[in-house]
Amino acid sequence: MSGVSMMATQFRFTNKAFWRNPASAFFTFAFPLMFLVIFTTLLGNGDAVINGVEVKTSTLYVA
């Protein structure tokens, strides 16, 4: 079995194991998006100055 084939097999099994646990999928994808929406809603979409550059706070939260 070649290295690429073994890597593809390992990736497939790891991916299956990850998606079989719904809690891990939720906390990996949906939970951070909820925080982004909550912080942007509560704190507004104002401007912040970082190193002399003006950026939107929603962009700052993502970075």
Image (tube, rainbow, N blue to C red):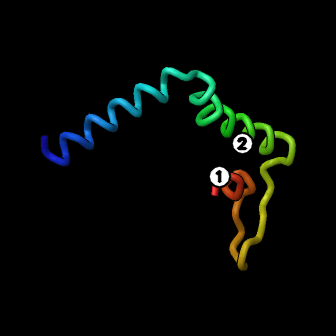
Circle 2 — which element?
helix
Q: Residues within 10 Å of mark 2 (few under 14, many from 20)?
A: some
In the rendered image, which residue does mark 2 sit on? 36
The image quadrant that residue 31 belongs to is top right
Where residue 51 sits in the image (x, y, percent)?
71, 78
Instruction: List the single residue furthest toward the left.
Output: 1
Does residue 60 lie above or below 41 as drawn? below
Where residue 26 sits in the image (x, y, percent)?
62, 28
* Identity, as a three-letter code, of the amino acid under mark 1: Val
Where residue 20 sits in the image (x, y, percent)?
49, 20
Left or right? Give the position of 12 relative to 45. Answer: left
Name the residue nearer the viewer: 21 or 26.
21
Residue located at (86% from left, 48% from top): 43
Q: Mark 1 or mark 2, which has the lower sequence index?
A: 2
Left or right? Give the position of 4 relative to 42. Answer: left
Circles 1, 2 touching at the beta carbon (< 8 Å): yes
Circle 1 — which element?
helix
In the rendered image, which residue does mark 1 sit on? 62
* Identity, as a three-letter code, of the amino acid under mark 2: Leu
Name the residue nearer the viewer: 20 or 32.
20
**What whole-number distance in Å separates the C-alpha atoms at marks 1 and 2?**
7 Å
Where residue 45 sits in the image (x, y, percent)?
78, 50
Residue located at (63% from left, 58% from top): 63
Q: Residues within 10 Å of mark 1 (few under 14, many from 20)?
A: few
Left or right? Give the position of 4 relative to 12. Answer: left
Residue located at (72% from left, 79% from top): 52
